[in-house]
Image: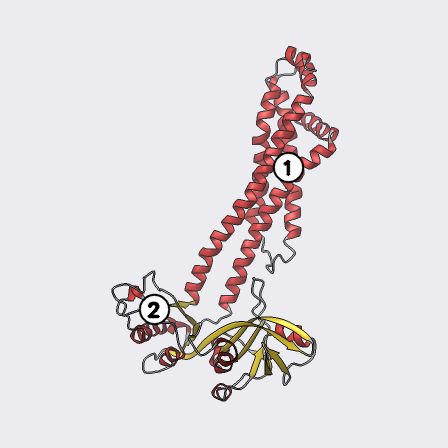
Amino acid sequence: MNPFQTLRFAFGGLAANKVRSALTMLGVLIGVAAVILLLAVGNGSSQAVKDSIEKLGTNALTVSSGSGSGGSRSGAGSAGPAKPLTVEDARALADPSAAPHVAAVAPEVTTSQTALYEGASHTVGQVVGTYPAYFKASNSKVAKGDYFSGDDVLASRKVAVIGSTTATDLFGTADPVGKKVVLGGTPFTVVGVLATKGGTGFQDPDDVVVAPLPTVQNAFTGFGSVGQILVEAKSADATTAAQSEITAVLMARHGIKDPAALDFRVASQASLLTTQASTNKTFTVLLGAVAAISLLVGGIGITNIMLVTVTERTREIGIRKAIGAPRGVILGQFLAESTLLSLIGGGLGVAAGLIGSHFTIVGIKPVVIPESVVGAFAIAVVIGLFFGGYPANRAASLRPIEALRHE
């Protein structure tokens, strides 16, 4: 029997049980599509976070509370309990004699509040209280109106610059500048609208309200510690020097002598990208493992169906062997059937995965990894051969006389 005849018999065998064959291929289809789509979601999430970090600006450094360099604050070099970051820390960092490579400093407090405007309601993802230096350091540019000023901070004025998503959800197509919006029960006058940054991650960077620090502290968070301090170095080349100066200033203020026992972290864009890449790799591997289980289940389905097929066609196998069909022909026929199931199912799974990647999933725009498409399809074919091997070998090993006696 030549390969063409083998394929013709295989197609005939699958066509004889269309519904059963379709359901078996569906298992492989779901497995392949899941591998492609979940890895694309992981890759898309990684790209979104990377874009967000890059939009912070090349000179940006972020100072946050917590142990740095893997050290413990309660170590021998500490001088007491860990100290939270404060506005006074930010002022110390803004001293040019102590930190000459620092261009600007913006302490931040962040909360989430519901905004109201003429019956429209919107839950703002980020309400940021900060200084005007925040806009330049975070690469946030105003598209309409203006930024709030240092005088607004000193006077604790209830003014705000809002993101484009917040503006659209509250004001529609109307110009928000000059209008009052009630944020968590406190009225704020909108003085500017930020240009759209765009993003496909879990958090929309354009769903934000930025207001003077003391105003947000007075209305929402209280006058305690700050969440983080955003620092702008004088240039991209000065970030390393600025990072060292920030560490020295805060160690002195927090009474820390051991650099391994820091109670704060200073993260540059490069370190954020490295951390993000590591986290994303774990996330993507986890998603890929879950999808691979689906593909494995599809392969087990092929084994199950092929065993049923061999049992149903035992007499046919006996007749073919009785008239001289060699073992290899029987083996090849059933292997061809199982491989066709995985080939067709895998091909449809690739199509489903690619189509599904055009949709936004839980706020993430999937980015397909070409290697995952080739890999998932190849693994599906191998699974068809592997899981079809046992039933095919069982059929080829049947003795003609026993097969012909089968009822």
Residue 343 is tagged as 1
Which secondary structure lies at badge 1? helix
State the residue at coordinates (63%, 58%).
Answer: 360
User: Which residue sits furthest top?
Assistant: 401
Q: Residue at label 2? A: 82
Q: Relative to the observer, which residue lies in front, 386 or 152?
A: 152
Q: Amino acid at mark 2?
A: Ala
Q: Is residue 201 left or right of residue 258?
A: right
Q: Is residue 20 left or right of residue 396?
A: right
Residue 100 spot, x, y in % from top left: 34, 80
Mark 1 Cα-neighbour bin, 10 Å: few <14, some 14–19, many ≥20: many
Vertical order, 272 against 313 (above or below): below
State the residue at coordinates (31%, 76%).
Answer: 253
Which of the marked residues, 1 or 2, is nearer the chain's N terminus?
2
Determine if residue 227 is in view: yes
Residue 39 spot, x, y in % from top left: 55, 50
| Image quarter hosting the C terminus | top right
In which quadrant of the rendered view does residue 310 lie?
Answer: top right
Tag in front: 1 or 2: 2
Vertical order, 104 against 205 (above or below): below
Determine if residue 323 is in view: no
Q: How is the image coloured?
A: secondary structure
In which quadrant of the rendered view does residue 181 lie?
Answer: bottom right
Which secondary structure lies at badge 2? loop
